[in-house]
Amino acid sequence: MNQPANLRSWVSDANQHADFPLHNLPLGIFSQGGSPRRAGVAIGYSIVDLHAALAAGLFSGAAQTAVQATADGTLNGLFALGRGPRVALRNRLLELLGEGSGERDAVARCLLPMADCTLHVPAKIGDYTDFYVGIEHAKNVGKLFRPDNPLLPNYKYVPIGYHGRASTVRASGTEVRRPRGQTLPAGHSEPSFGPCARLDFELELGVWIGPGNAMGEAIAIDQADEHVAGFCLLNDWSARDVQAWEYQPLGPFLSKSFITTVSPWVVTAEALAPFRCAQAARPEGDPRPLPYLWDARDQAEGALDIELEVLLLTAQMRERHLPAERLALSNSQNMYWTVAQMVAHHSVNGCQLQPGDLFGTGTLSGAQPGQFGSLLEITQGGKEPINLASGEVRRFLEDGDEIILRARCRGMGQSSIGFGECRGVVVAAR
Ligand code: CA
């Protein structure tokens, strides 16, 4: 599956592109002007219109089947086909877009400037589950509530998660309306109702599910990777004051379901293959996972080495043409459970996973300051405000603040690939 690092494209701006060089080829759903939604692939600053390329006769066999499966303007059908057709499409695109392609002129007619297109949530999401596998986040947040015992006893046995709302998952660029809700002000015994005063972000990876399972049939851990189509960035916007009042006993509810933002490009499992690594977040001496969560190959190469970044751009920074300020730089190696373990656990009771289902990993913080993937951690629940280079101060997000998530894979001897951006601007409560 590994691609040589020196793959070059005749689409010349792709070769130095930080996110979308030839060996990435992420899948997405776009529209241009009022056109119907259709599937595309990012290459440099352009999109290959797969529908147009299909009409031009550039695909045959399994690659053709893969593109035909996107005819409804979503990637669900392609995800449902599993790895084979997805790989065939990738291999054909490597030929078509590679230096020395014999079909360069025909492909060039199918390229659109990405800046002229609108990108959408790439699949119709049936179910969205948010996990809690970032162990440093779990420890950092646990410490705020239980300084002596930050991790609850189930953490090292169960990949913890909750069921989120698929209805409010939106693509990067969608504005984030400050939610209103119930909160319990400090020192009060009765709740208040009003705009959230402690609005936060959460830096997460998203996982797009492929074929899935029949209800009642679990996915074995050594088969789990067959059910992962690809990855995105995910911001699980969180109303901390609403969350603190509502979360017991059943977990987050309205504090999370007002919006979840995803980056629109699906970075495929194949593109990420060179950036897999050994599971390192589980130290020696931790309990061995139960057999249904244990697989030697998954332990050896099931983790991911993806650099994750959060930036803040305030309204004042935009007005003064200041650059966005980095709030955190972390890595997906802080996942205590691998994606395969998440898939195996989610389905072990017979729960059906379906093509286009979305998982969030949970906040992927590191252990050190500068690596925290939420303001809850960065400001210690608002107690230690951030002094920004612009002279502004933040405890939680204010109206006009934009959060930008980015991700990059930098392998030894490999050109980097990236995810594109996951952005959202906070706007005032209604
Ligand atoms: Ca979360």
Image: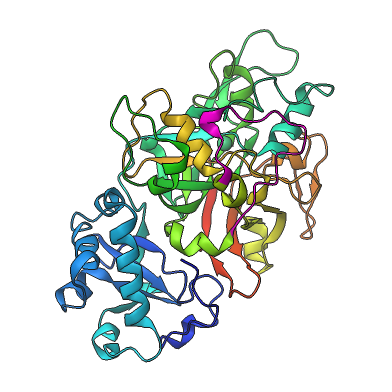
Q: Does residue 381 appear anywhere in the picture?
A: no
Q: Is residue 109 left or right of residue 234?
A: left
Where residue 115 appears, as percent x and y from the top left, is 41, 73
The secondary structure making up most of the magenta span is loop
Above or below: residue 378 compared with residue 153: below
Magenta stretch: includes residue 210: no
Above or below: residue 324 compared with residue 340: below
- Given residues 357 and 3, the one toward you in this image is 3
Q: Is residue 189 left or right of residue 342?
A: right
Q: How is the image coloured?
A: rainbow
Name the residue at the front extreme. 296
Image label count? 0
Give the quadrant of residue 117. Answer: bottom left
Q: Quadrant of ligand 1?
A: top right
Give the magenta range: 276-296
Above or below: residue 323 compared with residue 108: above
Where residue 401 appears, as percent x and y from the top left, is 61, 51
- Given residues 103 and 4, the one toward you in this image is 4
Q: Does residue 332 appear anywhere in the picture?
A: yes
Where residue 134 appears, as percent x and y from the top left, is 65, 39
Q: Is residue 20 left or right of residue 290?
A: left
Q: Residue at x 47, y 64 (%)?
A: 271
Above or below: residue 387 compared with residue 414: above
Q: Residue at x 46, y 34 (%)?
A: 344
Q: Is residue 242 left or right of residue 281?
A: left
Where residue 100 appears, as percent x and y from the top left, is 37, 92
Give the quadrant of residue 118. Answer: bottom left
Q: Residue at x 84, y 22 (%)?
A: 148
Magenta stretch: includes residue 289: yes
